[in-house]
């Protein structure tokens, strides 16, 4: 494997470190009762409000319409994702430094599979969250 390819794989692996420094997803909501807006930041290992009380306010609004509470500690993916990302970084660096094509192709295939599984898992969580409304007692 040529040196340039090794550098690209190592760089791609190290880019995954950014997932620990920046949120993966932002959700911004605007409503008349919140003129400054409220929002969520979804990190690799936590869900936080963009401002101190945003998560509490969003949970309050969701309760009002019968949706479940967002409880970051109840989301197992937030606990295992950091380990998966660290594994992918180390695996990618090993593939880059050894230069073995099988390891590079395995890393790329594993990356694609993990991305697809992650997107499917997030879709299923969102689907359940949006469709399984809390039954309000009358």
Image (cartoon, rainbow, N blue to C red):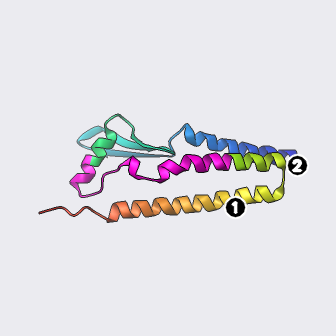
Describe the element under mark 2 as helix, strand or loop.
loop
Quadrant of residue 15 within the rendered picture: top right
Residue 82, given in percent of the width and then of the height, sits at: 56, 46
Q: What is the residue that sits farthest to the right in this orientation?
A: 2
**Looking at the picture, does residue 106 appear above or below residue 51?**
below
Label 2: few (<14), some (14–19) or many (≥20) C-alpha neighbours in 10 Å: few
Q: Position of residue 117 (x, y in %)?
A: 56, 62
Q: Is residue 136 left or right of residue 15?
A: left
In the picture of the structure, the residue carrying the numbered disc 1 is 109
Kindly identify the residue that appears in the image at 52 percent across and 60 percent down. 119
| Residue 66 painted magenta | yes
Q: Nearer the viewer, residue 96 or 40?
A: 96
Please name the residue shown 35% across and 49% down the image. Answer: 71
Residue at the far left: name it: 138
Tell me the tag on residue 4: none
Q: Give the overall secondary structure of the magenta segment.
A: helix
The part of the chain drawn in magenta is: 60-89
Q: Is residue 46 magenta?
A: no
Q: Is residue 128 left or right of residue 83?
A: left
Does residue 27 lie above or below 131 as drawn? above
Residue that appears at 54% across and 58% down: 118
* Residue 109: image location, x then y, percent: 70, 61
Residue ID for mark 2: 2
Mark found first going from the N terminus, 1 or 2:
2
Q: Is residue 107 above or below residue 36?
A: below
Q: Viewed as shown, does residue 76 lie left or right of 117?
A: left
Which callout, 1 or 2, points to the residue nearer the camera?
1
> SS for tag 1?
helix
Question: What is the spatial separation of the Cα atoms under label 1 and label 2, in whole angstroms?
Answer: 20 Å
């Amino acid at each position: 494997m040529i040196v340039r390819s090794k550098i690209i794989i190592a760089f791609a692996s190290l880019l995954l470190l950014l997932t620990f420094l920046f949120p993966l997803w932002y959700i911004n909501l605007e409503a008349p009762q919140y003129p400054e807006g409220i929002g969520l930041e979804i990190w690799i290992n936590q869900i936080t409000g963009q401002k101190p009380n945003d998560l509490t306010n969003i949970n309050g609004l969701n309760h009002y319409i019968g949706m479940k509470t967002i409880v970051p500690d109840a989301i197992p993916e937030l606990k295992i994702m950091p380990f998966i990302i660290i594994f992918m970084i180390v695996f990618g660096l090993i593939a880059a430094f050894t230069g073995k094509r099988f390891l590079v192709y395995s890393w790329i295939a594993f990356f694609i599979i993990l991305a697809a599984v992650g997107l499917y898992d997030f879709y299923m969580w969102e689907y359940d969250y949006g469709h399984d409304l809390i039954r309000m007692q009358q």
